[in-house]
Image (cartoon, grey):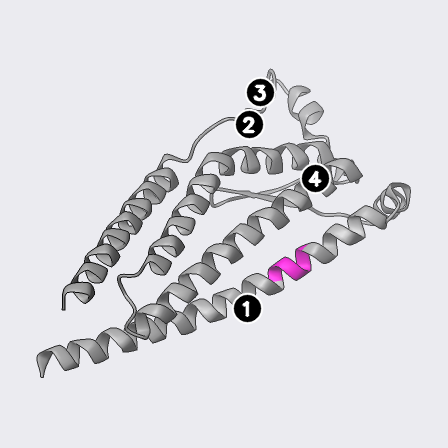
Amino acid sequence: MDQTIQSKEFRFLTKGLRTIFTMVMIFTIMGLVVMGGLLIIAIFVPEKAVNSILANGSISATLQFEGMQILLADQVAENIRFVKKNVVSLLVASTLYIAILLWIVMLVRNLLGNLSSGVIFSVANSKKIEWIAYSIVVISLTVGAFRTYIAYTVVQLFKLESQLVSTDWVKDVSFHFSGINWTLLLCGLVIWTIARVFRYGAFLQEEYDATA
C-alpha cells in the first residue's frame, strides 16, 4: 500500500514538473522566435537609417547591473549609435544561448515524461542527462565571455568608454572575455555523475531482467 502511494506521488510530481517545463519550453520558443526576428531586422535594416532615427528622436536610457539601475544623462543617451556588426553579433550569440536553453528544457521535459511512465534506469535516460550536463558545461565555459560582450556592446553603442575616461574617476576601461562560471561547471559535473549512475543502473536492470 505504501509503495503504491509513493508511486502515485512520484508520478504526480513528475507529471507536474513536466507541465511546468512544457510552459517554460513554450516561452523559450517564443523568446527564440522574437530573437530571430530581431536578428533578421538588424541584418537588413540600413545602419544609416537607424542612426538617423536615433539622432532625430528623444532618447532616455537606463542601465541595470546586479540590482543597480543607472539613469544615463541626456548627453550620454544622445550619443547612442547603432553599430550593425556589434548588434548582429550580440543577437547571434543571444539566439545561440536561447537555443541551448531550449535544448536543455526539452531534454528535461522528455526525461520527466519517461520517469512518469515508469521508465527510470535506462540508457536513453542516461544519455539525456549526459547531454544536459554537457550543455551546462558549455554554458559555464562561455557565459563569462557572453556577459562581457553584452557590456562591450552597450559601451560601444553609448560611447561610454570615452565618457568614463573623460572623468577624473576612471583612468581606463578594458574587457576580459575569459572566465569560467565554476558554479555551473560544478553543477554540470554533478549532473554528469548522475547520468553515469543512471547508466550503471540500466546495466544492472538489464542483468536482472536477463536472469529473472
In the picture, residue 207 is in which quadrant? bottom left
Q: Tell whether label 1 touches label 3 (CB within 8 Å).
A: no
Residue 83 visible here = no
Q: CA distance from mark 4 to mark 1?
A: 25 Å
Location of the C terminus by quadrant is bottom left
- Residue nearest the viewer, comparing 112 with 13: 112
Q: Which residue is mark 2?
A: 177
| Residue 77 in which image quadrant | top right
Task: Tell me which segment is drawn in magenta.
Answer: 31-35
Q: Say what amino acid the circle numbered 3 marks.
A: Trp
Q: Which residue corresponds to mark 1?
A: 26
Q: Residue furthest top?
A: 171
Residue 31 spot, x, y in % from top left:
61, 60
Check the image and name the residue furthest to the bottom. Answer: 1
Q: Residues within 10 Å of mark 3 (few under 14, many from 20)?
A: few
Residue found farthest to the left? 1
- Give the residue pinned by disc 4: 89
Q: Which residue appears at 70% of the width and 39% of the height? A: 89
Q: The N terminus appears in which quarter of the rendering?
A: bottom left
Residue under label 3, please give it: 169
Q: Nearer the viewer, mark 3 or mark 4?
A: 4
Mark nearest the camera among 3 and 1 is: 1
Mark 1 lies on a secondary structure that is: helix
Q: Does label 4 or label 1 sit earlier along the sequence? A: 1
Are there few (<14), some (14-19), or many (20+) residues within 10 Å of tag 2? some
Is 33 part of what is drawn in magenta? Answer: yes
Element type at mark 2: loop
